[in-house]
Amino acid sequence: MIMLKGYAHMVHFFTSFEWWKTEPHDELVNNGAFCLAETGRVYVVYLPRGGDFILRLEPGRYGAKVVQYPRNG
């Protein structure tokens, strides 16, 4: 049943934004992070090993939301 919790996290994550409008933009982040972006609107950063990162954005006003899912279920 732990596996089902993992799927629930994935469903919640991918229904929280219009992921199909994003494209890979790993050049916008550092430290081994991955980035999906709808440039100028939505940026999703994945940190496979946790840690810090820098996200390079065009000047402007942006909101931020941090979502942390457990690594072990």
Image: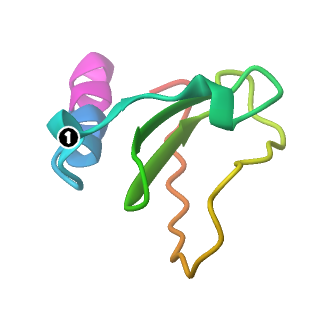
Q: Main secondary structure of the magenta part?
A: helix
Look at the image and give the residue range highlighted in magenta.
1-7
Q: Residue furthest bottom?
A: 61
Q: Is residue 67 visible?
A: yes
Name the residue rendered at 29%, 37% in the picture.
Answer: 22
Q: Quadrant of residue 24?
A: top left
Q: Secondary structure at mark 1?
A: helix
Disc 1 marks a residue whose amino acid type is: Lys
Q: Is residue 47 visible?
A: no
Name the residue rendered at 23%, 55% in the picture.
Answer: 16
Q: Residue furthest front?
A: 59
Report if residue 36 lies within the magenta region.
Answer: no
Front-lying residue, 64 or 60: 60
Q: Quadrant of the N terminus?
A: top left
Name the residue rendered at 20%, 40% in the picture.
Answer: 21
Q: Give the x, y percent position of residue 61.
A: 56, 82
Q: Give the x, y percent position of residue 54.
A: 79, 47
Q: Quadrant of residue 14?
A: top left
Residue matched to label 1: 21
